[in-house]
Image (tube, grey):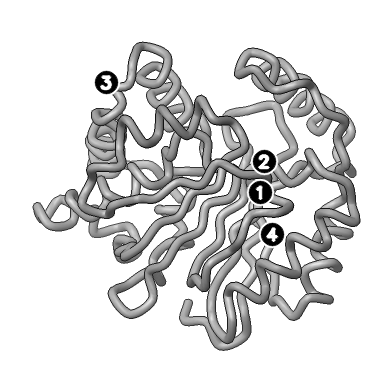
């Protein structure tokens, strides 16, 4: 989507609003929020392309798997406040209106930062410190999994995605960002950075179980999803792709 001065200004305001709660959670949380929300194209991309716009009062339940310190929850709250002030860009699809948010995260330190910074927001996000392979998934309208599924083996990926499909029921959407193994250079770059960030955050450096986008798409089709692959590496050297997987009948 072409950038304009108006949308640039709107994004900067949204970015500041979403980062603000993390000031109370310490320097690391504040700087991580600013850097991740500001530099990773997926957050702005999901808004500009309308991938979150189906969330509304009658279908706004979000499950964020591998949520970290809850950046998506804070962004969703910022979107609602920005829209209420009449500042939502006319060039963008409708603002998301999440009504419930559950974040699932393995790292206890990230969960503590999330709870300390944003649990008081009107969205009232809740956080579960658990392994995504065992965590219960509540009924929901949107599941978001960004850059974490490759940490577990292929059979475990399959099992988790089956549970996601069940949690979404007869309607809903999965937003799954993965690296494309068919792009050897970009995939290698993303995995190198991933390992560094993982080590800094205190995880053990895990093996990576990737797939090509063709293989990911075939897996999601087999589970009953309609799938659109959207490049999501703008401004980076990586091979990241956002798979927008729809349960048939979900409103666009």
Q: Residue at x 70, y 26 (%)?
A: 237
List the residue tagged with mark 3.
23
Q: Along the horizontal axis of the image, is 252 left or right of 242?
A: left
Disc 3 secondary structure class: helix
Q: Earlier in the sequence, mark 1 or mark 4?
A: 1
Q: CA distance from mark 3 to mark 2?
A: 25 Å
Q: CA distance from mark 1 to mark 4?
A: 9 Å
Disc 2 secondary structure class: loop
Q: Earlier in the sequence, mark 3 or mark 1?
A: 3
Q: Residue at x 82, y 28 (%)?
A: 206
Q: CA distance from mark 1 to mark 2?
A: 6 Å
Q: Along the horizontal axis of the image, is 40 left or right of 44?
A: right
Given this view, does label 3 or label 1 mark the residue nearer the observer?
A: 3
Q: CA distance from mark 4 to mark 2?
A: 15 Å
Check contact, mark 1 vs mark 2: CB within 8 A: yes
| Other-residue count near label 1 (Cα within 10 Å), few / some / many at <14 / 14–19 / ≥20 | many
Picture disc at residue 147: 2
| 180 to 111, vertically: above or below | below
Picture disc at residue 229: 4
Observer-nearest of 233 and 153: 153
Disc 1 secondary structure class: strand
| Other-residue count near label 4 (Cα within 10 Å), few / some / many at <14 / 14–19 / ≥20 | some
Q: Earlier in the sequence, mark 4 or mark 3?
A: 3
Q: Residue at x 66, y 76 (%)?
A: 166
């Amino acid at each position: 989507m072409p950038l304009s001065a108006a949308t640039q200004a709107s994004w900067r305001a949204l970015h500041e609003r979403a980062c603000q709660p993390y000031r109370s959670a310490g320097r690391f949380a504040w700087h991580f929020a600013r850097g991740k929300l500001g530099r990773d194209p997926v957050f702005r991309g999901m808004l500009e392309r309308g991938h979150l716009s189906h969330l509304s009062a009658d279908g706004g339940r979000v499950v964020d798997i591998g949520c970290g310190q809850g950046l998506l929850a804070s962004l969703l709250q910022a979107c609602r406040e920005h829209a209420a002030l009449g500042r939502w860009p006319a060039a963008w699809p409708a603002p998301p209106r999440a009504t419930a948010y559950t974040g699932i995260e393995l790292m206890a330190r990230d969960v503590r930062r999330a709870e300390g910074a944003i649990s008081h927001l009107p969205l009232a996000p809740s956080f579960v410190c658990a392994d995504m392979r065992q965590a219960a998934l509540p009924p929901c309208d949107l599941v978001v999994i960004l850059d974490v599924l490759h940490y577990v083996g292929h059979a475990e990926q399959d099992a988790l995605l089956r549970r996601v499909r069940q949690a979404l029921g007869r309607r809903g959407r999965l937003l799954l960002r993965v690296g494309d193994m068919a792009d050897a250079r970009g995939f290698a770059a993303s995995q190198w950075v991933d390992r560094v960030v993982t080590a800094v955050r205190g995880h053990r450096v895990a093996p990576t179980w990737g797939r090509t986008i063709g293989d990911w798409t075939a897996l999601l089709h087999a589970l009953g999803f309609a799938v659109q692959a959207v490049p999501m590496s703008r401004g980076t050297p990586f091979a990241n792709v956002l798979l927008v997987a729809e349960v048939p009948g979900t409103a666009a």
